[in-house]
Image (spheres, rainbow, N blue to C red):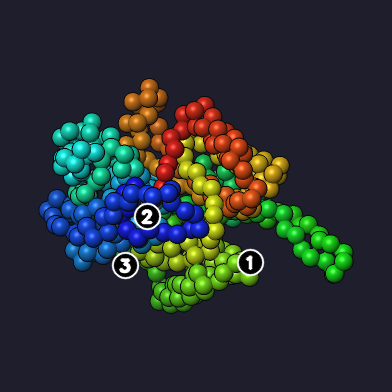
Amino acid sequence: MVCGGELLDEGLTLPAQPTVVSLRRMNQVLDINLGRRTVRVQAGAKLSDIDRRLGAHGLGLPIVGDHRDITAGGFASVGGVSAASHKHGLFIDQIVDLEYVDTDGRIGTCGRTHHTERFQRILGAGGRAGIITALTLDAVEIDKERTWLTTNADRFLDFDSFVEHAYAEIARPGNAELQVGRWVDTAPLKVARPVGTGHVQLGTVRFGQWSSLYPTAPTRGLRARREVGSRARKSLGAIASAAPGKAGMPVRNAAAGAVLFAPKVQTLRDAEYLADTALSSSERGPAYRVGVFAPLSSYTSVFYRLHDLFSGHRERTGCFTVISAMTYGVRSRYLRAESAARGLPPEDHGLITFTCRLRPAALPSELLRDIMSGIEEICRSENTLRYEAE
């Protein structure tokens, strides 16, 4: 197991006696080439730190993750996607070349113009084809602190309308700088009646939002609203992180809602890390996650089938509580090449990720195998690619 930063604990344990190769101290920005607009970094460097260093030179990374602890090597090993992927592709589309150590301990290099087959094999391989130790990345001219975006948000109470709208926005993004769709589907709620009268069961809560963010010039009033909103979300995220167990559930749900009801105007820097201010602290406890890159020709079918798979198991067994989904558009050279290599049309894709909160006691291994088998069948029949996020 290769780890770029600190190990995160979500209540799940590592396999017995794991071997972990940590790149936490290999975290330097080695060189910034202003003429070529590239940056050379060690694999353990955090993308947020790299981006800040580039910002001092009027540059920035086109693709960063949605939280500040993602490392360059970690993102490269899984492909790397963000709300800007409809415009710039995957993180691995931004890699010029890399240094790696193979399973025999040999140091090698590869890139877009040399040892290209090895380059394609190592990217997105999760460390199985070699441990990435350094990378050269493309940068773009941008000032993320002074690039302001306005949010056009569409909200939905039914899943069909949400999926239809998401497909239309992914297929035709216009000049949106960022785009993201989120859907939340809760299990029926049980509310206690007076003593001795049992419980009453309420219906599910289902809602979604699609957000497209466009360049804008903010007024003084909007700048002030952005500052107040930013402080409020950070405070809510901190409170949610400290709110344990069932008693903290309302606060954590409010933190997740703060992401759905994002500010109207914000900087590009704020928008890239919005989920990190509240959503990550609201999602606690074990969960089953799956992400797929669906070709646009089968995007809606994949979305429906995955949703039906998870909600069906929840209805029959109660193994899941909250089922949530996030989706982006992805226009990637790497994915188009992967499709062509499989004899498929080189299409653009939509990323669909589901996070299903678990009732561990209600998910025996046989049921988990059945769910995984269902996912594999959807991927095979719809020509999708699995996405393993860091």
Q: Which residue is mark 1?
A: 246
**Label 3 residue SS:** loop
Q: Gap between marks 1 and 3, in whole Å?
A: 38 Å
Q: Quick one: label 1 or label 2, which is nearer the N terminus?
A: 2
- Which three-letter amino acid code belongs to the residue tagged 2? Gly
- Residue 160 visible in the snapshot: no
- Residue under the image location 51 percent in, 50 percent down: 326
Q: Gap between marks 3 and 2, in whole Å?
A: 17 Å
Q: Quick one: label 3 or label 2, which is nearer the N terminus?
A: 2
Q: Residues within 10 Å of mark 1 (few under 14, many from 20)?
A: few
- Residue under the image location 37 percent in, 25 percent down: 342
Q: Which residue is mark 3?
A: 145
Task: Give me the disc on residue 372.
Answer: none
Q: Nearer the viewer, mark 3 or mark 2?
A: 2
Q: Nearer the viewer, mark 1 or mark 2?
A: 1
- Residue under the image location 43 percent in, 35 percent down: 385
Q: Which residue is mark 2?
A: 65
Q: Gap between marks 1 and 2, in whole Å?
A: 29 Å
User: In the rendered view, does 249 fall on the left or right side of 342?
Assistant: right
User: In the rendered view, does 388 fall on the left or right side of 161?
Assistant: left
